[in-house]
């Protein structure tokens, strides 16, 4: 069974309030990793509140980015129930 956007959203919904690390492709061989707390999910995007040392406060990503492997997300394993 293929992975759908709703499956991705439901998986991310289960981790609201947990620490998350998001690695995104910013160039051919360059990546950027941002860490923070998963704060909210919406029908098309999810919002991460970044750690204080970042110049941005919040950033949003789409579920399509996860589906197409443009971003990789990792949840803090120590916070799993």
Image (tube, helix red, strand yellow):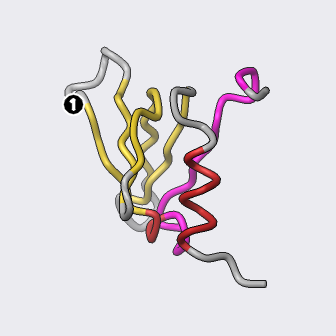
Most distant residue in the top direction: 52
Rendering coords of residue 2 (x, y %) = 71, 83
Asked whether, in this view, residue 32 is left or right of residue 68, the answer is: left
- The C terminus, quarter of image: top right
Whether residue 76 appears in magenta in the rendering, the answer is: yes
Front in this rendered view, residue 65 or 80? 80
SS for dot 1: loop
Question: Image quarter for residue 30?
Answer: bottom left
Magenta residues? 66-79
Q: Residue at x 60, y 56 (%)?
A: 10
Rendering coords of residue 19 (x, y %) = 55, 27
Asked whether, in this view, residue 43 is left or right of residue 7, the answer is: left
Q: Residue at x 31, y 15 (%)?
A: 52
Q: Is residue 49 above or below residue 22?
A: above
Asked whether, in this view, residue 21 is left or right of residue 52, the answer is: right
Q: Residue at x 63, y 66 (%)?
A: 7
Rendering coords of residue 1 (x, y %) = 78, 84
Q: Which residue is mark 1?
A: 56
Q: Residue at x 57, y 49 (%)?
A: 12
Q: Is residue 30 above or below residue 52?
A: below
Question: Image quarter for residue 75?
Answer: top right
Front in this rendered view, residue 19 or 12? 12
Front in this rendered view, residue 29 or 14? 14
Q: Is residue 80 above or below residue 75?
A: above
Asked whether, in this view, residue 45 is left or right of residue 20, the answer is: left
């Amino acid at each position: 069974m293929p992975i759908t956007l709703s499956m991705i959203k439901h998986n991310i919904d289960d981790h609201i309030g947990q620490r998350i690390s998001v690695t995104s492709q910013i160039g051919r061989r360059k990546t950027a990793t941002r860490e923070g707390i998963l704060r909210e999910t919406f029908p098309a995007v999810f919002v991460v509140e970044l750690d204080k040392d970042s110049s941005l406060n919040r950033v949003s990503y789409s579920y399509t980015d996860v589906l197409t492997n443009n971003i990789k997300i990792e949840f803090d394993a120590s916070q799993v129930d």
